[in-house]
Amino acid sequence: MVSWSLVQTLLVLFGPIIYNRGKAFYYAKPRGPPYPLSPTSRRLLNVLFITALLALASTFEYFAAENIFLATSSRLQTPTDVLFTRISRLRELTPADEILRSRLSTKEGRLLYATYGPGPLTECNWCSLDDPNTFLFYALPSIGLPHLLHIAIIGVVTSSFFSSHGGIWRIQATIGGVGLFLAEIYMVGMSSSARTINSIARTPQDVRWTHWNLAFYRGISMALFDAMLGYAIYLSGTGRWTIGLEGPRLEEKLESLTKAVETIVARLHADNFLRQAVVRNKQLREKMANYWADEEILGKDIMQEEDVQQSRLNFATARMDMDRLADEAAKKSEGMIDRISAWRGFSPGIAD
């Protein structure tokens, strides 16, 4: 496995470069001012927040299975009778403890206990110590259930049915959720580093308790994943992140434009229906004709007023002055262009 010192060295060497390149890439494309987050996107972020809190809560020791070796400060090589004598001093023994006693009588059983926890060793009737893969097959549902629930929540949050901003990240989020599940399966069933270390461990601190460690890392990784997904939805939902999202943005604008057109068409249909109802009714038609006749007379009376005529005359005079000013400006600009052309050796009017 990669050592922590190597990771620190790589971060020191390449961290600033990656950060600066990422920052430059983020600010490379001009963006408009951010806009408020939609209510639907807020609800989706609340769902992710609650899921992250539950994932963090699952890392508490209260929800973890009992580790009898750590509870009694015993080595992995401690004799079985001594181990369970120590347990009996802490609590009463149960039928599950008697089954566990028989499974822990061999070194293979103790290595499987560190890898899969007490559940498969005490609950699986068809599992055999001679075939460790049987314990893996039994433990797969309990390992996969939290990930399946997590992936289902991701599917709901990134569904385009609820919000287009979440749907933008659907593929990336699904790949990430499945990647967490495959990583845990690899660490439990395929990685042999923990088994090799446990076979030579002398103290409880040297043992890699894979089952308990993965339960802790699972909750932390899910919480971090939900936080990053929520931040991505927030950036895209408020318009702070637009790189690579031009297509969805265009679809969103087309959708809003289509809704506006549909509203206008509905209003035109309503106006046409009202006009036809008025035309077909004799009394309403007469009222409409009288109304427009009165409006025409009123308009003529207004135009005959002295103040209105004076305002029209002033406006026409100002318009004439503006036209004359525009003509003079055009003539002066043409004269300046002719002088510049003459200085450069061109004949007047060459700019045309």
Image (tube, helix red, strand yellow):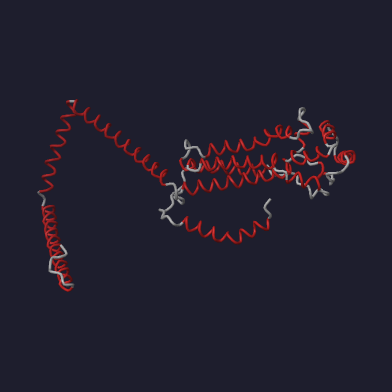
Residue 301, how many percent across, how many down? 11, 45
Q: Nearer the viewer, residue 340 or 94?
A: 340
Q: Nearer the viewer, residue 234 or 202?
A: 202
How many marks the image carries: the answer is 0
187 horizontally vs 159: left or right: right
Residue 297, how many percent across, how many down? 11, 41
The residue at the point 65 percent across, 44 percent down is: 219
Asked which quadrant contains residue 189, the reply is top right
Whether residue 219 is situated above or below residue 313 in the rendered picture: above
Residue 138, how many percent across, how many down? 71, 32
Asked which quadrant contains residue 6, the reply is bottom right
The residue at the point 76 percent across, 27 percent down is: 126
The residue at the point 74 percent across, 40 percent down is: 115
Q: The C terminus lies in which quarter of the figure?
A: bottom left
Residue 318, how many percent across, how many down? 14, 60
134 horizontally vs 83: left or right: left
327 horizontally vs 124: left or right: left
Q: Nearer the viewer, residue 160 or 120?
A: 120
211 horizontally vs 341: left or right: right
Whether residue 93 is situated above or below residue 8 in the rendered picture: above
Asked which quadrant contains residue 257, the reply is top left
